[in-house]
Amino acid sequence: MSTLALDVDDLHLTFPARGGDVHALRGASLKIEAGEIVGLVGESGSGKSVLGLAALGLLPKGTKPRATGKVLLGGEDMLTADESSSRARRGSYITAVFQDPMGSLNPSMRIGAQLAEAAGRSVAPAKDQLATMLAATGIADPEVKLRCYPHELSGGLRQRVMIAMALARDPRLVVADEPTTALDVTVQAKVLDLLAGAARERGTALLLVTHDLGVAARICDRIAVAYAGRIVETGTKSQILIAPRHPYTTGLLASRPRLDGAVAGGELPTLEGQPPDPRRPASGCAFKVRCPVADSACDQPPPVQIIGGRRCECHRPGSLAGWPAASSAAHAETGRLVAELARHQGDRVSVPDPALVLANIRREYPRPKRHPFAAAPEPLTAVNGVSLTIRQGGSLAIVGESGSGKTTLLRMAVGLLEPTEGTVTVGPGAGPQLIFQDAGASLTPWLPIGRQIAERLEALGVARGERAGRVLATLRAVGLPAEAAGALPRQLSGGMRQRAAIARAIAVPPALLACDEPVSALDVSLASQVLNLLCELRRKLGIALLFVTHDLAVARAVADEVAVMSNGEIVEHGPTAEVFADPAHGYTRELLAAVPEVAAAA
């Protein structure tokens, strides 16, 4: 009997589409042993999630995908299995934990009923058995949580419920697709450790799909790297993290912000360019146009090398010792374009120091009465007595867990919320601008990007004849081509939409640029480019930056100062390098310890 929990062999998967067939997978191969934890990493569009869905037998039937190859679960091919066989495999042999538990849990059913359903037994488990299942995932007061609805639990608790449901029938394989992307760093660490511990205790194999190598490094035995629909490198965790052989893996590792990296340096190494369009697969090596060591041999399909269980698809494996520092040519080009933008905006107002002053601000929210005759409860205090100052051209990162008051503080700083007490003072000049986490939701979907940028110029009285030149200069400053001016938001990639949102915000340089988790949903390659851009804009245009994030490594990469927030209060504040090197507060030490660091895990 095979010891493999999953055997994917030469899987090709093509989805018919109006603009041309989408080649999601192009010969992907991956094997997972029983009880093994394997991380599948890569950028968006690399085929990671599609491979997981193929293993689960959940490929969208309406699109009528064309599939060749094999996806074997215990000897049964999920590509040829009928719906009843696939359904029988799901739950008993293979289960899943998805990124958004609210999208997976039934909002109209209590947690206990959903957990009992997931157990799939002819006789429903007793309440004490269900409580034991929840308690095994670290949920306190499980008897109470069984009676709750999903919306009554926090994001971390909902994800723990999903893990309990996934493990309820002791499956041989669990597919976890970005299970911690939306979680705070401390909750992320606990959920990852829980998932890995539960899998190892039961001898269950785990396929962890993630875009973050740090997450994979924390719990995985082996790591597989996906690019353009193929698995381009696999190896043990130490092999991949210490001595990657494929240039793409080297670039992914180099692009990650680090806790020991430069403070607000703006020189993170970046993976320039984009993965190839899956509608037009590249001939030869798919990575050649982004690879710093590509040569004429890369015009041909790369050979597969397998040495000591380590697999790599590359013409020149191991030839790149490190990724080129900061891609100096691209960095210089960004600086030139930002300088060009500054020349176009010679009429901008110089902002005196400071750019932002928060003086003892407090924000309360009333709580509803339990019943009409009850006394009014004490209000909820989201921000309590915070005082902060940002100098002209300065940068401050606010870090902390969800519910700490970070976003409420940011919204008061830009005028979207009025403080209950205290004052907010912004330096003169163009009003503060806010960049949201989801750029797609903040851009007007029916207006071309160029028109959205021009609206800001028009509102400030810029002459019609000058607007087109300033729009193009702004787009170039954020690394977007002139063609993006005529594109609708839905026609741009996630990274391009985030750049477009930044372009709209800086078209008239504001006194303050506020950013609410602007890179948390981006691939590491795109995130490093956006962080470098923000640092360059701050230096060249004198914009003050207020940056909210739960990622401390990102905070270090973009901010001179950091403020640590917990329960609505600032518990520690100071220069970023000093706070990270010698944190004074226990909560800061806890946050730093929870950051998934590649070097430590290797």
Image (cartoon, helix red, strand yellow):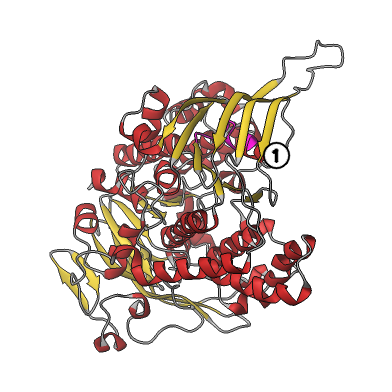
Residue at left offset 66%, top offset 51%? 433
Residue 66 percent location from the top left of the image? 50, 79
**Residue under label 1:** 108
- Residue pictured at 44% horizontal, 58% vertical: 532
Q: Is residue 436 left or right of residue 445?
A: left
- Tell me: residue 430, above or below residue 249: above
Q: Quadrant of residue 273?
A: bottom left
* Horizontal and vertical percent position of residue 442: 68, 56
Between residues 100 and 201, which one lies in front from this camera angle? 100
Q: How many marks?
A: 1
Comparing 114 with 509, the one in front is 509
Tell me, yes or no, whether the highlighted magenta stretch contains residue 419. Answer: no
Q: Which residues lie in the magenta part?
A: 399-409
The outermost residue toward the right is: 372
State the image quarter where residue 556 is shown: top left
Res. 584 in view: yes
Residue name at image x 75 percent, y 77 percent: 465
Per the image, label 1 sits on a secondary structure element best described as loop
Identify residue type, mark 1: Ser
* Vertical side of 2 occupied by 566: above or below: above
Residue 203 horizontal side relative to residue 113, left or right: left
| Most foreground residue, 588 or 173 | 588
Q: Is residue 75 something one can see in this rendering?
A: no
Residue name at image x 27 percent, y 65 percent: 323
Q: Is residue 407 magenta?
A: yes
Q: Position of residue 36 (x, y in %)?
A: 28, 50
